[in-house]
Image (spheres, helix red, strand yellow):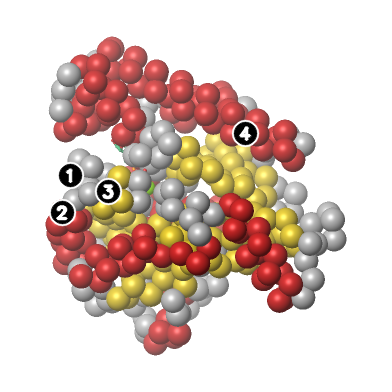
Amino acid sequence: MIDSIKETINDALYFGPKGIVGIDIGLSAVKMAEVVKEADGSYKVMNYITVELPEGTVIEDEIQKEDELLEALQRGLKELRTSSRFACVGLSGPNTVLKRLQLAGGSDEEIEDQVVWEAEQYLPFPIDEGNVSFSIIGENQGGGVDVIIGAAKKSVVNIFKELVERASFKVKIMDHTAAAMINVVEISLGDVVKGRGKTWIIMDFGAQKTNFVIYKNGVIVFFKEINIGGLTITEEIQRQMGVSYNEAESLKIQGDGNGNIPEEIVEIIRQVLDSFFAELKKTIDFWVSSTSEETFDGCILTGGGVQIAGFVESVQDLIETEVIVLNPFEGFTYNSSKISDDMLQDIASRGAVAIGLAMRSIAK
Ligand SMILES: Nc1ncnc2c1ncn2[C@@H]1O[C@H](COP(=O)(O)OP(=O)(O)OP(=O)(O)O)[C@@H](O)[C@H]1O
Ligand SMILES: [Mg+2]
């Protein structure tokens, strides 16, 4: 998988039985997970915690409320009750890039030169202000190679790294959140998605954005961030109903307190999802027209959005293929002394990225 920003994983050899803590800093919450690889090769989620964040703590990749985020990280570490202080932190947003490049190929050095040349055209920042890494994903039809590059702006990397380290972690690796999600899909769904000739859409419908991936022949071939998520619904409820952020979140999730979502709220959700589905359709159409490939084997969904009533069915109507809601626990066992049954649902829908980041200790 891609190391957007790999410092060194040498220490991974000395981690012992306890792994690295995967830290996913999203708009709605900080999620932390610890995963170990068992002797039989299976993976086990040892610890997991979600610490909800106050409104607007992190917007895109900018930390707006440093103290609140630091406090959430410290609380997470305390409640996680782990002895590991090593972390793999997820990054996404406008200052990160995850992109497939089709190159002419050649020697390692020539490929590296081509990556630099191509990356310069796509990066939203000067290349010397970024960390760029790549991995070869296969040969292309033109006789060259396809690579996938992961890149992030150094200044953004450093801001996250410093804050996480102030919370007593040592940041070993940073990885794109979409790559982390794919790690979990591969373990949980295995041969359903992997293998030659298979093409799947994999989406994380979060709070501020949706990570959209096309996964083909066992690798990421296309990635896009769609700027619509659960927050878009919350903000629209705030605007149309004149309520606060917390009230809007509660109307969206709990409804009237008896589990009924009021008709006006259902209508607002529908409006936002309509614009999301229009974006989704445009993204898929773009892929289809630029590759002349039309068939998908199916779609995998994760993120808080899967809990919105009717969301999964609507995706199914649009894509007209099998839709699977990702459940990491189909591939991972878990430590039942630390993870209670009532946490499973939340982890299953919102925890995939943190789990995928935590897998990096046992790097492939
Ligand atoms: N039952 C529910 N019904 C509707 N929406 C829900 C429900 N539960 C959670 N959500 C929404 O899901 C979102 C949180 O999902 P998630 O944890 O995947 O996002 P995040 O990782 O914090 O955000 P991002 O990745 O965009 O930064 C919030 O907008 C929340 O309101
Ligand atoms: Mg997220």
Disc 3: which residue: 58
The count of marks equals 4
Residue at x 31% of width, y 54% of height: 25
The answer to which of marks 2 and 4 sits earlier in the sequence is 2
CB-based contact (under 8 Å), mark 1 and mark 4: no
The answer to which of marks 2 and 1 sits earlier in the sequence is 1
Query: What amino acid does circle 1 point to?
Result: Pro
* Quarter of the image where one finds residue 241: top left
| Secondary structure state at the residue bearing disc 1 | loop
Query: What amino acid does circle 3 point to?
Result: Val
The answer to which of marks 2 and 3 sits earlier in the sequence is 3
- Let me know if residue 198 appears in the view: yes
Instruction: Check mark 4 vs ligand 1: CB closer than 8 Å? yes or no.
Output: no
Tell me the distance, in whole angstroms, between the alpha carbons under discs 1 and 3: 9 Å
CB-based contact (under 8 Å), mark 2 and mark 1: yes
Tell me the distance, in whole angstroms, between the alpha carbons under discs 2 and 3: 10 Å
| Secondary structure state at the residue bearing disc 3 | strand
Front: mark 1 or 3: 3
Near mark 4 (Cα within 10 A), the count class, few <14, some 14-19 or many ≥20, is some
